[in-house]
Amino acid sequence: MAPADLVFTRGPIHTQDPARTRASSLAVTGERITAVGHDDVRELIGPATEVVDLTGKLLLPGFQDAHIHAVFGGLELAECDLTGTVGVDEYLRRIREFADAHPERAWITGGGWSLESFAGGLPTRHLLDSVVPDRPVYLPNRDHHGAWVNTRALELAGLTKDSPDPADGRIEREPDGTPSGVLQEGATGLITRLVPQRTAADRLAGLLRAQELLHSLGITAWQDALLGSFHGQCDPSDAYLTAARDGSLTARVTGALWWDRARGAEQIPELVARRAELSHGRFLARAVKIMQDGIAENFTAAMTSPYLDSCGCATTNTGMSFVDPVALRGHVTALDALDFQVHFHALGDRAVREALDAVEAARGANGRRATRHHLAHLQVVHPDDLPRFARLGAIANIQPLWAAHEPQMDELTIPFLGPERAGWQYPFGSLLRAGATLAAGSDWPVSSPDPLAGLHVAVNRKEPDTTDERVFLPEQRLDLGTAVAAYTAGSAHVNGLDDAGTLRVGHLADLVVLDRDVFTAPPEEIARATVLETYVGGRRVYTAD
């Protein structure tokens, strides 16, 4: 055999291949792995071979994110960034500083504030008015299911106490009915239609900014969970297509085309046309994203029983199903027949059930197809629905970082779910024991895109570096090998990359090198590991300074 282009030696190498889970050497020729083994692989080292000594390090398959909004995350990195803090004074300082630094901006935009920072998760327009009274401000929260706006933005949108709530959202109000400064779900579109659109150049710059960050975290592929126009937000599709055509897209990306929930089956031919138009090189738009419900913290996640109020009494609110459940079955059946993967946002237990019902309808009508439908978020899953994932071949797309005790969980979620339903949250272990295939993602910019942080929480059910010793539903913890599989082979399966996600001969050389072997370190130190190098198709796309 001819000498390899690249050889990793003196492992450990975690292959994610059941036939050989650990190795010490691996060879790459061109884009693909040509040998996995031990000292025998060294025979492939020639005069021009690059040799990487792994002593004290760990080689893994490249991480893949099965649910992310990369372009939006990259755009927000250049705007008013409110992440990384929960202090109201710090929010206001950053907003004022950003506005002062950008007098040319007609609107102040950005986001990332946390619901836990405000009583009931509801900031006011008056707080924003105190720092930016003369220009409109629009700031989505960390979950991107609601937004904080100032009085000027409300005035420009013509929103008053007489303005009705949209069918798919809610305007939070002061006692007299005047909009208070928070818009939930579809109500955000009342403002975003006025916000200046980002240009094509902005979107491309956002994608490349995001790609650089994601490669630095060991991510080699992802599924972008929203390609289309949503509540007035820009469509990021053109950025991917441009980057795929000019070669600047170094990651492998699956795109999920947005299902317009205000329309029905008449949009399916358009989705077929967009799939053909947008697929090029490393970018393939072969999924459709259906957002079936909202989030628990603002009581829009669809539940099988009502939310509780602050006194622990049942309300009349069971959340929102954005797509009629009966119509959903027909839509998914039609999409499945056209070989589309359906990527569901399903957070409440009713939304999970409705999505599974739709997958079951498609299976009944079309038989088993290689469409790999997946349900993302899965915050609350009714125990009766756990075995349905394996039976239907529906993939559980988990966001591990959310499965921990923190103020948003303890103050804004658990009290309003009640003890029984709160115990059904993020049931990773139960899904695994029921035979479900797990994939993993971040939902960035909703939360950190760092897979190592996600692995830490999946294994420990505690946030990294927390002083809170409580373990969130400890029976739902995953072992590290299973969690790594979700971020590699599981997400590769979701993304249709059957020749990635494991390190075996013939597979793509999508690789990440960590600074330590996390399998031999204490579980509470997983998040302390760092990425040293990332490779896509044998080409180094990131190296730590």
Image (tube, rainbow, N blue to C red):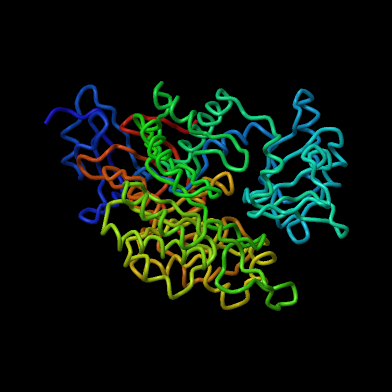
Residue at 58% across / 72% down in the picture? 422
Residue 172 at what x, y percent from top left? 76, 55
The total number of labels drawn is 0
> Where is 190 relative to 245, above or below?
below
> Where is 406 relative to 156, above or below?
below
Q: Quadrant of the N terminus?
A: top left
Residue 489 as seen in the image, left or right of residue 229: left
Q: Nearer the viewer, residue 195 or 79?
A: 195
Residue 87 as seen in the image, left or right of residue 492: right
Q: Nearer the viewer, residue 468 or 342?
A: 342
Residue 223 at what x, y percent from top left? 43, 43
Residue at 49% across / 39% down in the picture? 227
Residue 284 at what x, y percent from top left? 37, 36
Q: Nearer the viewer, residue 334 or 11?
A: 334
Q: Nearer the viewer, residue 518 or 157?
A: 157
Q: Residue furthest left?
A: 1
Residue at 56% across / 74% down in the picture? 421
